[in-house]
Amino acid sequence: MWQSSRPGSIYDYIRVASFSLGPDGRIDQWSERAEDMLGIPARYALGKDPVEAFVPRELRATGRRKVSEILDGREWTGLVPYRRGEGTDADGLAEIYVMPSHDENGERAAVCLVVDVRALRGIETDLAASQAVFGQSPMGFTLFGTDLRLLRVNERFATVFGGPASKYRGCSPHDFLPRAEAERMTVALRRVLDTGEPVTEMQLVGMAPGEDDRRRWSVSLYRLHGASGRPIGVAALAADVTGRRRAEREAANARRNLALLNEAGARIGNSLDLETTARTLLDVAVPQFCDLASVDLYQGLLAGDEAPPGMSDGSAELRRVAFASAVSDAPLATAPGVPGDAPGPVAVGAVHRYPFNSPCAGALRTAHAQIIPGRDSDDGPELGAVVHSTLAVPMVARDTVVGLVQFSRTKGSEPFGERDTALAVELAARAAVCIDNARLYRREHERALILQRSLLPPGDPEAAGLDIACRYLPGTTATEVGGDWFDVIELPGHRTALVVGDVMGRGLRAAVAMGELRTAVRTLALLDLEPAEVLSALDEIARGLGGDGDGRASTARSARSRSGEGAGEQRRSAATADLSEVYLATCVYAVYDPVTRRCTFANAGHLPPALVEDGEDALLLDVPPGMPLGVGGEPFEEIEVELPDGALLALYTDGLVESRHHPLEEGLQAFRAALSHADRPLEDACDQVLSAMDTSHGEDDIALLMARVHGLPKDSVGDWSLAPEARSVARARELARDQLTDWGLQELVDTTELLVSELVTNALRHGHGEIRLRLLLDRSLVCEVWDADLAQPRRRRARDTDEGGRGLQLVGLLSQGWGSRRTPRGKTVWFELALPDGESAAVDPAEALLSLF
């Protein structure tokens, strides 16, 4: 059976030719390969002496001697120069192998093999280079045969897997790789051998002998071909990339950590709400950093306690404020504490404690993060069984532990390491500072709200002859405090003072300034001064509050500051200047008398009040604007306006009608339009005005005070003039008795008669001119006695031996309140009695009179 193959054998590479010598020493056979390699056709070679034909002249003697020895039966090998063709110079060097033989007659002959020395030396060089590359390569170099078994491995491969390189000849991948990886390697080898397509950087994982850590190799495969082009095997190059893979993983972790920190810095702390901050922390951490997470905050911190929230042993009560999971919606099972302890899941909002010996309590106690391994068994809560690593990280802000964060990873994720712990501590610290800031803000915010609410009147102020509705909107919902204020002050005679003011500035300082000015307004109003007088006195108070009370000292300090003396003085001077700017304010002050239905206005740089009469469009009252409070130097004017029943009066601050989006005139026009259609119940009208205006700009505080006028009915007023004579005392008692009987207030008749008698007697004794008696009935009974004398009555304590001087003491004992005020033509002395409610008994006048002795 003949088998043929394509050219490309080793003989083609080393260029081997043959010829033979006959017994006479001449060439009797010349192969075609010799003709091709030596360049001499057979017709020129056959029958010739090879020495004469091919050997140079100077070597022919030696050549003949060697031919004789060969024909004598000796083998010979040597290098022989030769010429290519007849008459040419020697241009070749051949290594000739001469082997004695016999012809068919039994005579001596020779067979000669000719090898081209240059080709042979090239092959030797290539083999040496191949051996050097194969043996000295720093990578594992292996050759697999077509049966996928190793033909050869280099020393690097043998060093990694142990033993000499010859040990692995005939081995398969299963002999040095884990089963799964060996199967992958075998499939890849078969595919490369069958298709010829190389495989690059295939990742294989295995264990090197004598090592505990897994190694990772990057393997490239390519098919080898023989000279004839047929596949003869597969070459494999393997590089150990364990270190590179670890470095890549660490670099990826570092990039992830930096990204997490950047995201945390951008998102955590955008809210001043504790729970929102905790949830944002978990949104950042899950699932980028862990699979489950929870945040517990000390209950004392959430309750606003001033003391440090946690006990020193870490066992204080905590509340679960946030939970997040990428694997389940179920609550996170707490980490096991003492042996045998497996507490159940803690729901969001639940209050709980960690046992003293638990890792979580230890983390809270020591303020250091702890890595808690998961349970190996499947006992306990379902979710806890799949958690294999937990980080308990205390949240520390300003050296105070405010809570605990637990980051957990489930089975299949890498357990937490040192880098993870450092990142978790950083995330928890950032969230802790934000939570502590939120706690401090909430505390200060609550204090500010308490201050603000204490400075504003109650939600439903009442006044005689007026229905009142009011609204206050802070300029920013972050603080909810500001410098706008309104007030409703009851004055003697069932009169009412309506006040709206606006301190320049915003925030807590403006609220404090507003509180001081509001208190001053109330004090001045109770002195029953005219509106212009109230504003003048308030202006003096505002200037005293805004300055330092000593103009000369302030001037001297300013001079020292300009000359460069005392940096501390300059700072205090700047603070004083800033404070005085805060106390600039505008205010409108109005006093309404429900009997006369007239309202007196005075204005200190404030926007004019608005008035809406029944069926008419709203108009702005022409009240002289005056200068703002704290400026000084200009008197205030006042005007008196009659308000018919059903009229609507509105006092407001500029935040309602002015913003950067529209000018003041446009806002005032819109405000008048909103008031013109406010013919509904007063509370609804107030809401309608706010909804019609742009109140969401958040640029300034808004105060709105609306009052609907209905006055006192005529049958609720008794008004008489009395002659300045003694019998007027009896007449006053009679008028009071009859009026109270008509009103059905018989229970107050005796007390009223006694007190009216005292006031009229005092007017006759200490005053002069005509006497006027007036009774007013609304939510209480008010009695007023007018005379033309300007001297104010003064209450004094009478001695036991005195026959008089006890009238005003008696008035103070029997009345709910009493006082006096100046009028344009004298003074008015008044007292007030509470209406009977059927439950509390009135004071017995006889008992009160006897108590004076």
Image (cartoon, rainbow, N blue to C red):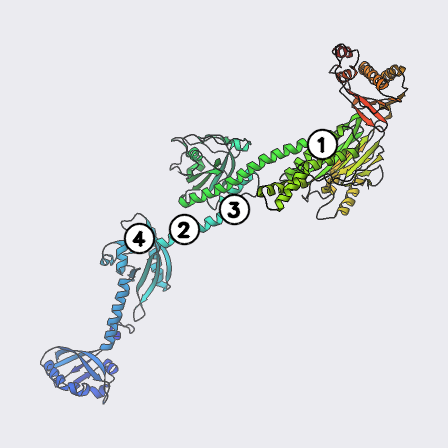
* Residue at numbered disc 4: 177
Disc 3 is placed on an element classified as helix
Disc 2 is placed on an element classified as helix
The answer for how far apart the CA atoms under marks 4 and 3 are is: 47 Å
Q: Is residue 781 left or right of residue 201?
A: right
Q: Nearer the viewer, residue 562 or 588?
A: 562
* Residue at numbered disc 1: 520
* Residue at numbered disc 3: 265
Amino acid bearing label 2: Glu
Q: Quadrant of residue 162?
A: bottom left
Disc 4 is placed on an element classified as loop
Q: Position of residue 732 (x, y in %)?
A: 87, 17
Mark 1 or mark 4, earlier in chain: 4
Mark 4 or mark 3, earlier in chain: 4
Crowd band around label 4 with a 10 angstrom C-alpha radius: few (<14), some (14–19), many (20+): some
Q: Nearer the viewer, residue 21 or 821?
A: 821
Mark 2 or mark 4, earlier in chain: 4
Q: Nearer the viewer, residue 795 or 628?
A: 795
Q: How many marks?
A: 4
The answer for how far apart the CA atoms under marks 3 and 1 are is: 47 Å
Q: Quadrant of residue 791?
A: top right
* Residue at numbered disc 2: 250
Amino acid bearing label 1: Ala
Q: Position of residue 578 (x, y in %)?
A: 65, 42
The answer for how far apart the CA atoms under marks 1 and 2 are is: 68 Å
Q: Residue at x 68, y 32 (%)?
A: 455
| Mark 1 and mark 2 residues within 8 Å of each other at the beta carbon | no
